[in-house]
Image: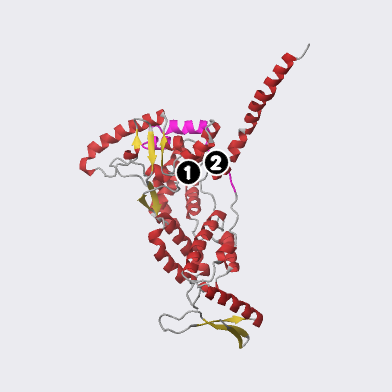
């Protein structure tokens, strides 16, 4: 295979004959590319291209843009990808990637462009308007004047939906004030965007749309490690006392004594609960896709699908809840919603996971407790279990972590707190007892 380089105007172009005939024409295709500033640069690119052609990775020149590729890619991978991941990645592409580099030719996309994209997203990437802060500012000003603004007034003044305004007013009345959002995206979000781009461009290389994957040669922004806020046992006990009369009191108790994920507790069915032996089998999920709740089989990680034990108090609470639910089922009769979910509304409908999250926020604020997220209940359980002396491996398995090593990194601060006690116990056994035995044997 021979190539040639020639000058066209002020730039240089390479050209060579492809190694295989085109099945459509029966002729050897001519592969060329121009725009190089020097003859040396063109020759280097020519040799690289011929090497790629010898390995069967022949790229035909294409004007396909990044935006056009993503449209094709998302349609192709939807059936083989988890629904929540697919929707999240599509939202990332439409909100953050396509508006900034969508017009770029796919074959021209390189590492500097991706690094520039990530820097811009970190600095000023937030595209969603901070309506929450705007609504709170309006609501606070009205209440300071002695008024009691209704949700429809908040929605009209701030240009939001009535549903968003109702949820916001409930939060404000419960004492939950919004935190002002920075203009840039969090490093974790940019890392997620990088993961999406890396996977998409890997497929582009496999489809022979690109010669290589530029996302493989750069590192995403470093994720800052922050210690999650958790409740101590006193706060947990106070919360459970204040929600005893709430409809979902048993749900919160189960969450705090198992640490399972929100989707798993909302998707739990009675067929997966064994009250005789005190066990639940965690398998089905109730997830949120594009704002809508959807049932999904299988857990988030390979360890997520498992059977775990529940304590006697939680078993008793679930038994009492089931008796109450059976009365509601009998009352509604054929109008009772099918599905056999453990936690439901009066007519058997399972709750939307976001509804549980919002309900928890209001109940925690009403109890005067430190503000944490519903997901932090999971961390609260794991932290309490470790402090109680449960093996890290057992705790990791119970909450469904895929990697025990990652679990140990996440809760290293908890384990470090036990290091002092471990040192004292070991020393008491090895040194003090040994010293006493030595002193008894020594002559007086």
Quarter of the picture holding the N terminus: bottom right
Circle 2 residue: 229
- Badge 2 marks a residue whose secondary structure is loop
Q: Is residue 101 visible?
A: yes
Look at 42% across and 55% down and name the residue there.
84
**Going by the image, does 437 lie left or right of 99?**
right
Within-10-Å neighbours for mark 2: few <14, some 14–19, many 20+: some
Query: Going from the N terminus, do you reach mark 2 or mark 1 first?
Result: 2
**Going by the image, does 196 lie left or right of 340?**
right
Identify the image quadrant of residue 184.
bottom right
Picture coordinates of residue 281, whole percent (x, y): 38, 39
Look at 40% across and 65% down and name the residue there.
76
Q: Which mark is residue 22?
A: none
Up/down of 218 relative to 136, above or below:
below
Picture coordinates of residue 432, whole percent (x, y): 69, 21
Closer-to-camera residue (136/90): 90
Identify the image quadrant of residue 3.
bottom right
- Farthest residue in the right direction? 444
Q: Which residues are magenta?
A: 225-253
Picture coordinates of residue 176, whole percent (x, y): 49, 44
Picture coordinates of residue 279, whole percent (x, y): 38, 34
**233 inside magenta stretch:** yes
Circle 1 residue: 375
Quarter of the picture holding the C terminus: top right
């Amino acid at each position: 295979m021979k190539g040639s380089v020639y000058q066209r105007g002020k730039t240089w172009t390479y050209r060579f004959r492809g190694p295989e005939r085109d099945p459509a024409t029966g002729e050897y295709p001519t592969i060329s590319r121009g725009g190089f500033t020097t003859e040396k640069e063109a020759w280097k690119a020519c040799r690289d291209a011929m090497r790629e052609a010898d390995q069967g990775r022949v790229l035909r020149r294409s004007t396909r843009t990044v935006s056009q590729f993503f449209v094709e890619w998302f349609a192709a991978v939807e059936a083989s990808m988890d629904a929540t991941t697919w929707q999240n990645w599509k939202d990332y592409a439409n909100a953050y990637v396509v508006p900034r580099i969508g017009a770029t030719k796919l074959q021209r996309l390189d590492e500097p462009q991706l690094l520039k994209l990530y820097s811009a997203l970190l600095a000023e990437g937030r595209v969603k308007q901070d309506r929450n802060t705007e609504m709170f500012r309006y609501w606070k000003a009205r209440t300071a004047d002695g008024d009691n603004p209704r949700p429809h007034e908040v929605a009209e003044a701030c240009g939001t939906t009535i549903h968003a305004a109702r949820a916001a007013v409930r939060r404000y009345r419960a004492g939950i004030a919004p935190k002002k959002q920075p203009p840039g995206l969090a490093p974790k979000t940019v890392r997620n965007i990088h993961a999406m781009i890396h996977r998409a461009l890997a497929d582009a290389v496999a489809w022979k749309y690109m010669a290589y994957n530029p996302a493989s040669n750069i590192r995403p922004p470093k994720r800052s490690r922050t210690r999650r806020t958790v409740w101590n046992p006193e706060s947990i006990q106070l919360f459970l006392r204040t929600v005893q009369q709430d409809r979902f009191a048993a749900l919160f108790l189960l969450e705090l004594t198992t640490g399972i994920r929100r989707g798993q507790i909302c998707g739990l069915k009675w067929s997966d609960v064994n009250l005789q032996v005190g066990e639940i089998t965690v398998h089905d999920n109730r997830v949120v896709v594009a704002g809508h709740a959807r049932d999904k089989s299988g857990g988030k990680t390979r360890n997520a699908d498992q059977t775990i034990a529940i304590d006697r108090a939680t078993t008793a609470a679930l038994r009492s809840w089931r008796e109450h639910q059976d009365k509601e089922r009998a009352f509604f009769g054929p109008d009772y919603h099918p599905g056999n979910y453990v936690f439901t509304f009066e007519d058997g409908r399972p709750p939307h996971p976001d509804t549980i999250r919002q309900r928890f926020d209001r109940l925690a604020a009403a109890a005067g407790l430190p503000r944490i997220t519903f997901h932090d209940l999971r961390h609260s359980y794991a932290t309490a279990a470790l402090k109680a002396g449960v093996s890290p491996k057992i705790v990791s398995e119970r909450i469904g972590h895929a990697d025990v090593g990652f679990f140990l990194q996440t809760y290293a601060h908890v384990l470090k707190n036990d290091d002092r006690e471990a040192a004292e116990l070991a020393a008491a056994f090895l040194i003090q007892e040994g010293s006493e035995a030595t002193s008894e044997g020594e002559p007086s």
